[in-house]
Amino acid sequence: MGLFASILKSFAPGGRRRKKKRRAAARSAGGFRPTDTVSDGRVMLAELFGSGGKEITDRLAGMVSAESAIETLFAGKVLKKNLRVGLIERLLLAEEEGRRWLKDENADLLIWGDMEELGTVARLHFLALGGNQDGQPGTYGMADTLDLPVPLPEDAGAILRAVTVAALLPVTQGSRRTLAERLIKHLDDAARAMASLPEDMPQDSRISVHNALGNAYATSFRFGNKKALNDAMQHYEAADKLIDAEKSPITWALVNTHMGLIKEAAVKFDRKPENLLAAIKLYSSVADTLSRETHANDWALAHMRRAMAYYKLASLQPVQAQVHLKSSASAFEEALTVYDKAKTPGRWAEVMNHYGVAQMALGGYGKAEAILQQSISTFRKVLEIRKRETQPLLWAQTANNLGAACFALAKQSEEEHLLEEASYYFQGAVQVYRKVRGQKKKAEVIQKNLMRVQQLLSDNAA
């Protein structure tokens, strides 16, 4: 997983939820919300590791709980990092432990971190129970932090609340509509609070604040606030101007990846290929700046982002579609030189699935039986990892792709066994999607393709 994994949710509001009695390990933050009321999200704070961490955590809890739409809990313990392993593994292990805490307390978001720079900076991480939403604008990944100077400025709470609500919004079990509306208000407060940050604030901390608020505006844009797009870009660009790419390549890559993602998101509204081309340029720069040897995962992730952007560009520029699809496939191949089936099976299967889709799209140009056969082979390999018994939705996604590739090749080669394979996988995908809430339309589309395949099989048998 890349350090800056930045991870499509609908704007439909989630149902509100009745609170359950909390375990002894967690307690309400100062009684800010009665236990018998309804909240739009539960946020847990772990005690910050380091000198003065407990006192700062208490203050942060008070700041967060000033937002009445959410409930604030204390974890009552520190989420420690294993210093004997590398940075990425260290963060992954910490997040794994943190998600167990969230699950135990039925909470949506964990704020955790450390006291840095001899206790003069509180570095906060934001961990969602459902994991990061890779590829989504505004996602707070492992390397996204909010670094607040200590002593905490008087208006730091406005910035913290904006970032907290933004991190909570995509994953809450409460009302997303309510939180989306509250986020707009908190962003207005945060914009005013930026002026109160101390002039001697460490530059790295100022970069993190700009990046965190850029993510918050990007999330607001993603959930319907179109005016937030320019604000997100302004914060990312402000962070970018403060970073030396040679000295801090990962931080630079993090911010530039977020800029690419927000430009991609803008295409859904304006349909301008220029935004996708700008995103591709950003991802290419990230790949060129990072070292494959030193930053292999993040280098590969940049190529994956570039590949997916090229795939989207093909639909916006149909005259050049074949060229864009070839560029997409080539970029996926670069990423696959890093992602290993044995060491990172989940990421490998994800990239391979996308790669197969690009191959299948290329198969739509002329007599392209060879590339279609390659896409079929790619999807079959993915299903060696994505098992129906353990990952039904991911299995259904790839099974549907495999059915489509078999159907496409069968129409060119007239091989009946391909129709039979398409029928088998379409049927399985329909069965899975029908059981999942919100997947009715997907199931209906696949069912129509299944009926077409079955009609061809029936005609052949007649």
Image (cartoon, grey):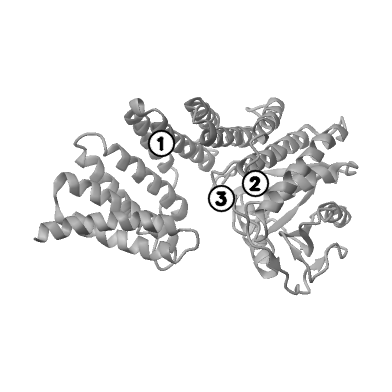
The disc placed on residue 9 is 3
Q: Earlier in the sequence, mark 2 or mark 1?
A: 2
In the rendered image, which residue does mark 2 sit on? 140
Front: mark 3 or 1: 3
440 over 389 or under it: above or below: above
Q: Secondary structure at mark 2?
A: loop
190 vs 6, left or right, is right
Nearer the N terminus, badge 3 or badge 2? 3
Disc 1 on helix, strand or loop? helix
Q: Secondary structure at mark 3?
A: loop
The percent coordinates of residue 215 (x first, y second) are 67, 40
Q: Nearer the viewer, residue 460 or 325?
A: 460
What residue is drawn where x is 78% and y is 74%?
24
Disc 3 to disc 2, how far (Cα)? Answer: 15 Å
Specify which label sits upstream in the sequence, 3 or 1.
3
State which mark lies toward you, 2 or 1. 1
Q: Is residue 382 visible?
A: no
Kind of residue sitting beneath label 2? Tyr
- In the image, residue 116 lies at what x, y percent? 79, 45
